[in-house]
Image (cartoon, grey):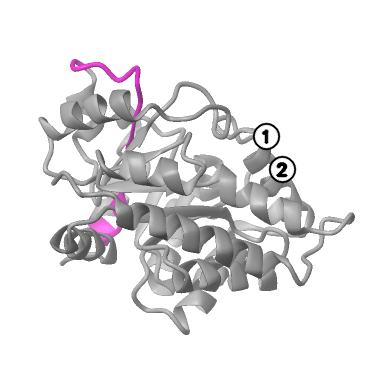
């Protein structure tokens, strides 16, 4: 059975352009605004949405996403509420792929079987769990694949040719290439180096390769999109949301418009890029 993620990448390949994948934190700054943000992303050009599962120890996240997670947790967001957020989004959007991204601890506490069942029920399409290496595939990856969810693995600049086949082994949907070393939101991606890395990954897999970390502007999206099957923008969107909030961290009349404006510009950027596939 083809997942929404696989269908979306296939459709975009046929169109000759890369995907725009946007990341936002579930429940930031509150449930209703978060739902509005998801709808705004899909309505202004995002092809896939990564939805963060807030966690109190986000070791791979930079300051912007850490702050978003803190706002979300302080607002009472839980994994159950994040799943409900997807369910509400699906009431009006049955097409946009949703990938939950985060850490294993909340899933483990929720219960793997219960989590996978609920994720499927509400319309989640894939998972990115950054602290589960391939050696732990029996924990979540394989059960997720057997349930019909894509499990997306990260490759990084330090993933050498010896390690890469292990990383790719049970990956499905797409491969997420982390363009820079370190945490999110701290540097800009180098298109030349990214192009070399994407080509190296594609020598070992037929999966699409999406590139994240260090993509902040429409020009970044165009330049990286020219050498990849997708570009992922997270910190720039999260910063845009943060900048629109009032002094108490609450949404304002500017919040949804700010998200719409940036996403529209990023979507125009990826549409300037040619797809190498």
**Tags 2 and 1 touching, CB below 8 Å:** yes
Magenta span contains residue 93? no
Classify 10 Å Cα crowding around label 2: few (below 14), some (14-19), many (20 and above).
some
Alpha-carbon neighbours of circle 1 within 10 Å: few (<14), some, or many (≥20)? some
Q: Residue at x 50, y 66 (%)?
A: 41
Q: Is residue 3 above or below residue 67?
A: below
In terms of image quadrants, where is residue 90?
bottom left
Q: Which mark is residue 67?
A: 2
Part of the protein shown in magenta:
146-162
In the structure shown, which secondary structural element does the residue marked by tag 2 occupy?
Answer: helix
Q: Give percent across and percent down for residue 136.
A: 35, 32
Q: Does the image show residue 99? A: no
- Total tally of numbered discs in the picture: 2
Query: Image check: 243 left or right of 145?
Result: right
Indicate the secondary structure of the residue bearing disc 1: helix
Frontmost residue, 251 versus 5: 251
Residue 30 image offset from top left, x and y in percent = 72, 65
State the separation of the CA atoms marked 2 and 1.
Answer: 6 Å
- The residue at 45%/67% (across/down) is 118
Q: Nearest the camera: 53 or 263?
A: 263
Picture coordinates of residue 271, whole percent (x, y): 32, 57
Name the residue rendered at 22%, 40% in the picture.
Answer: 170
Q: Position of residue 123 (x, y in %)?
A: 40, 71
Residue annotated with mark 1: 63
Q: Main secondary structure of the magenta part?
A: loop
Q: Eyeballing the image, is 112 above or below 7?
A: above
Q: Quadrant of the N terminus?
A: bottom left
């Amino acid at each position: 059975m083809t997942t929404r993620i696989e269908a979306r990448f296939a459709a975009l390949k046929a169109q000759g352009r890369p995907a725009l994948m946007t990341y936002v934190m579930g429940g930031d700054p509150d449930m209703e605004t978060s739902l509005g943000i998801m709808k705004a992303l899909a309505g202004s050009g995002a092809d896939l949405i990564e939805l963060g599962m807030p966690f109190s120890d986000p070791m791979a996240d930079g300051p912007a996403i850490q702050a978003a997670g803190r706002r979300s947790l302080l607002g009472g967001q839980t994994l159950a509420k994040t799943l409900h957020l997807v369910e509400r989004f699906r009431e009006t959007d049955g097409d946009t792929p949703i990938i939950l991204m985060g850490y294993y601890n909340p899933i483990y506490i929720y219960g793997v079987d219960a989590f996978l069942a609920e994720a499927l029920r509400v319309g989640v399409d894939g998972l990115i769990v950054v602290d589960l290496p391939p050696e732990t595939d029996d924990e979540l990856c394989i059960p997720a694949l057997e349930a019909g969810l894509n499990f997306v693995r990260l490759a990084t600049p330090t993933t050498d040719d010896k390690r890469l086949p292990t990383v790719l082994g049970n990956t499905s949907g797409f491969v997420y290439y982390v363009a820079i070393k370190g945490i999110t939101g701290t540097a800009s991606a180098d298109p030349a180096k990214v192009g070399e890395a994407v080509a190296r990954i594609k020598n070992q897999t037929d999966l699409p390769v999406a590139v994240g970390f260090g993509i902040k502007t429409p020009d970044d999206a165009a330049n990286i999109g020219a050498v990849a099957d997708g570009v992922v923008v997270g910190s720039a969107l999260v910063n845009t949301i943060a900048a629109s909030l009032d002094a108490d961290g609450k949404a304002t009349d500017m919040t949804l418009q700010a998200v719409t404006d940036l996403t529209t510009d990023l979507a125009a950027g990826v549409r300037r890029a040619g797809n190498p596939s």
